[in-house]
Amino acid sequence: MAVRDKRKKWKQMVSKIGCGHKTELDSYLNEEIETGESPSFSISEWWKLHTPRFPILARLAQDVLAMLISTVASESAFSTGDRVIDDFRASLTLKMAQVLICCQD
């Protein structure tokens, strides 16, 4: 479903409910769409510029955009090659094994 269709459906739903006041989300959804196709477009800068108009949504966007992206290749992230428990580690108590694994991470 296209973004415009979702917005139209949202507006119809809100009008059926009969909310008399416009929320911050309503105002945001009524904004003109910026596609971000420009090479200089930055979503972080857009939210910084529009924070005074949408303070709650800007805070949510800040939380989401602040998540770090891992650069670890998926093969190495899910590989157990270096994490196999040898005879020495197998003889350790569970608590000691957890401590060693935790320290390695």
Image (spheres, grey):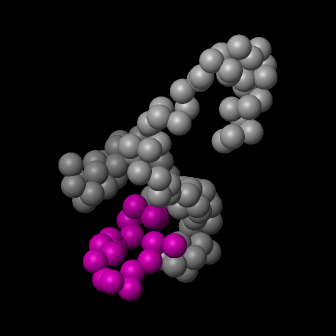
Q: Position of residue 96 (x, y in %)?
A: 78, 22
Q: Where is residue 70 in the image (x, y as percent from the top left)?
A: 50, 54
Could you tell me residue 85's position as x and y percent?
Answer: 59, 23
Viewer-nearest residue: 49 or 5: 49
Q: Please give the name of the residue rendered at 57% of the width and 76% of the height, measured from the top-left corner.
A: 48
Lateral position of residue 32 relative to residue 83, left or right? left
Q: Which residue is drawn at 78% across and 19% down?
A: 95
| Quadrant that contains the C terminus | top right
> Residue drawn 58% across and 61% down?
66
Q: Nearer the viewer, residue 68 or 89?
A: 89
Judged from this view, the residue extending furthest toward the bottom is: 40
Q: Horizontally, is 63 left or right of 91 in the view?
A: left
Q: Give the range drawn in magenta.
A: 27-44
- When asked about the image quadrant of residue 63, the answer is bottom right
Q: Is residue 96 left or right of residue 29?
A: right
Dividing the picture into quadrants, the one containing residue 91 is top right
| Residue 50 visible at all | no
Magenta span: predominant SS is loop
At which x and y percent is residue 33? Answer: 32, 71
Work out whether residue 22 or residue 61 is closer to the camera in this orientation and state it: 61
Whether residue 41 is in magenta: the answer is yes
Q: Up-down: is 60 above or below 16?
A: below
Left or right: residue 27 compared with residue 100: left
